[in-house]
């Protein structure tokens, strides 16, 4: 494939993702029967998507005896469940852990994936194809196959004890093949002439990448960061295995252990679930366009 | 130009820069991706217990054990493989049909389409564990919202997660619900790429909506459908989070009716410390995913001409 077709390809994806989230370009249709039916069906579906979360929040605001009386809204709304859950469990700490791990890996991914993607796109060096294939091939291996080796490695190198657990949780995701693949394509949009001009002006290679190329692929980097942050924030299987101390659990792992403590106290479980999801839901509501565009970008390309 | 100790040609300097840029990442891929992949194969040929260091080489014994277990009537692994197939067979088509339906409806409307798109996407950003909690509560016997609603309209209450027959579809439905938003977005992208003129031409030829759907929309969405089917199949093959958090003590019950391959990997490897056996299971999973991916590549290289 030639470079120019890649360029248009990357640009087309960007435009497409923009079209999906952007305002509709078509003129509003007259309210026909089929349009009305579409609205009714979509609304019914929307209820199914949202009611579980509303029910979760409403339950968390109910005192325990109210759970057996069937009423949608709490009669005596209370924050007691939140006080109880926050004082008896380590939710604050789990938040901090999840945030820390997600920030470490997202920052690292943004830096290294872009750098390698740029190198694979703009440089010519021996072994280039082999390296690219070697990176892409790792996409074929599911995480589940690596957890046992990762665990034995973490035990050997002490990554499952004490403060090193943060690294233990984060290390599998600090560089990603998907991100490199994605960034390699998006750097096609950066004209080679611009890079050559900077070279002639005496900017060093690192400076060219960081100050000239990177600003031009900001939307792609943002998409990568969003995709990665959500993935890390919700990661479960590996953190469950490697985090051995309660203080080092991430939010999903802590939440899962919390289930063992609260057993059938549904109001407590829904409080825990609300604590874990509501902040993320708020972030989603504020940034929903950017997030959907980001997922669309990575989804279409990846 | 400043004088240098070693004068390099431009090309040599470029090569050095390239490798300097990739150095950390290359180490990462070798140590964190390639080496563990080989190690996984290696462990699968050994009787490995993590706390005793490397175990003795036992050849294909672990695979032979899995093969034997597959024919034992009540073995967990037999249940795991069958259930995993059920998750794929139940989950993938329902996800595709529902997502395509919603995407087509979203394409019909102009007002509020952004709002609906966001609403359908909400579950995708929340964690499986929290989602599992919420649905445990919705499915709860007697007091759960769904059973209360069934009772309110005079239908019999259902056991859902407590029944060996209903538990698996109930969990698969949650996975479909959570992943729907993503599939909708990808379908929307596919629909956007179909040129409007095809529909106009079909209209002039007197085609009705159903004909346009079968003759234009569906064939032109072919590659999107294959992509989503493969992605969906892989994610259902890897089912773990929901099952672990929606069954009693995360055991994949009742009566192993919801357990999956990955749940057994977790139980064998990290509860029984039977690492060799667990590694052999993951190798089988790897080959299953590989086969599906190869099929995808085959199907997608047969490109649809516009």
Image: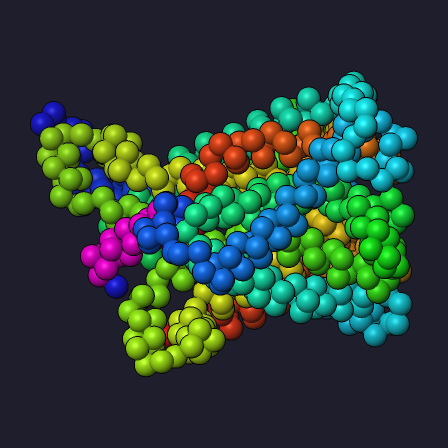
Q: Residue at x 89, y 67 (%)?
A: B74
Kindly identify the residue that appears in the image at 70 percent across and 48 percent down.
B241
Q: Quadrant of residue A42?
A: bottom right
Residue at the far bottom: name it. B205
**Lateral position of residue B5 relative to residue B129, left or right:** left
In this picture, residue A31 sits left or right of residue A27 = right
Q: Quadrant of the N terminus of chain A?
A: bottom left
Q: Is residue B273 in view?
A: no
Picture coordinates of residue B181 (x, y %)?
Answer: 54, 51
Q: Is residue B156 visible?
A: yes
Nearer to us in this view, A171 or A23: A23
Q: Position of residue B210 (x, y in %)?
A: 47, 75
**Quadrant containing the C terminus of chain A in the rendered view:** bottom left
- Image position, residue A287 (x, y; %): 47, 34
Q: Residue at x 10, y 34 (%)?
A: A200
Inspect the magenta stretch and tell me whether residue A7 lies in it: yes
Q: Position of residue B153 (x, y in %)?
A: 82, 55
| In-front residue for pair B242/B2 | B242
As drawn, B188 above or below B303: above
Q: Is residue B245 magenta?
A: no
Give the answer, above or below, for where A64 lies relative to A181. above
Query: Magenta segment range?
Result: A2-19
């Amino acid at each position: 494939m030639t470079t120019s077709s890649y360029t248009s390809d990357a640009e087309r994806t960007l435009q497409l993702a923009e079209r999906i989230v952007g305002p509709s370009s078509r003129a509003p249709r007259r309210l026909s029967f089929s349009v009305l039916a579409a609205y009714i069906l979509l609304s019914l579906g929307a209820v199914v998507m949202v009611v579980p979360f509303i029910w979760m929040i409403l339950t968390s605001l109910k005192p325990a005896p109210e759970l057996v009386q069937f009423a949608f809204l709490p009669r005596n709304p209370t924050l007691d469940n939140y006080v109880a859950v926050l004082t008896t469990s380590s939710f604050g700490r789990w938040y901090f852990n999840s945030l820390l791990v997600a920030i470490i890996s997202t920052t690292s991914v943004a830096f290294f994936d872009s750098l390698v993607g740029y190198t694979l796109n703009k440089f010519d060096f021996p072994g280039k194809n082999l390296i690219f294939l070697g990176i892409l091939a790792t996409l074929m291996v599911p995480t589940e196959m690596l957890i046992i080796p990762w665990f034995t490695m973490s035990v050997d190198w002490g990554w499952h004890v004490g403060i090193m657990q943060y690294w233990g949780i984060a290390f599998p995701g600090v560089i990603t093949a998907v991100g490199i693949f994605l960034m390699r394509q998006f750097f096609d949009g950066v004209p080679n002439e611009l890079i050559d001009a900077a070279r002639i002006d005496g900017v060093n290679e690192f400076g060219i990448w960081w100050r000239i190329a990177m600003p031009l692929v900001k939307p792609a980097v943002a998409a990568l960061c969003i995709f990665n942050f959500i993935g890390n924030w919700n990661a479960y299987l590996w953190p469950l295995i490697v985090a051995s101390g309660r203080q080092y659990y991430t939010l999903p792992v802590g939440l899962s252990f919390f289930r063992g403590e609260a057993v059938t106290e549904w109001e407590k479980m829904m409080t825990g679930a609300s604590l874990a999801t509501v902040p993320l839901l708020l972030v989603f509501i504020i940034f929903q366009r950017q997030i959907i565009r980001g997922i669309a970008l990575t989804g279409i390309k990846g | 130009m400043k004088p240098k100790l070693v004068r390099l040609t431009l090309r040599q300097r470029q090569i050095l820069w390239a490798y300097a840029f990739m150095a950390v990442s290359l180490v990462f891929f070798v140590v964190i991706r390639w080496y563990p992949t080989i190690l996984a194969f290696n462990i699968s040929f050994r009787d490995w217990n993590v706390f005793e260091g490397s175990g003795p080489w036992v050849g294909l014994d672990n695979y032979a054990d899995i093969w034997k277990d597959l024919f034992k009537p009540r073995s967990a692994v037999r249940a795991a493989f069958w259930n995993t197939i059920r998750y794929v067979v139940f989950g993938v088509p329902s996800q595709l049909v529902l997502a395509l339906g919603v995407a087509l409806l979203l394409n019909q409307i102009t007002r509020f389409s952004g709002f609906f798109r966001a609403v359908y996407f909400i579950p995708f950003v929340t964690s499986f564990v929290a989602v599992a909690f919420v649905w445990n509560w919705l499915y709860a016997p007697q007091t759960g919202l769904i059973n209360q609603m069934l009772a309110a309209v005079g239908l019999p209450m259902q056991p859902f997660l407590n029944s060996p027959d209903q538990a698996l579809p109930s969990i698969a439905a949650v996975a479909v619900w959570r992943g729907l938003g993503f599939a909708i977005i990808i379908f929307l992208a596919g629909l956007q790429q179909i040129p409007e003129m095809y529909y106009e031409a079909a209209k002039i030829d007197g085609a009705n909506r159903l004909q346009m759907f079968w003759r234009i929309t569906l064939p032109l969405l072919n590659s999107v459908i294959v992509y989503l089917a493969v992605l969906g199949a892989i994610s259902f093959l890897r089912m773990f989070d929901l099952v672990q958090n929606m069954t009693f003590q995360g055991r994949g019950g009742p009566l192993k009716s919801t357990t999956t391959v990955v749940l057994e990997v977790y139980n064998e490897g990290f509860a029984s410390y039977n690492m060799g056996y667990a590694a052999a299971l993951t190798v089988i999973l790897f080959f299953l995913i590989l086969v599906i991916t190869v099929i995808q590549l085959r199907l997608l290289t047969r490109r649809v001409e516009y």
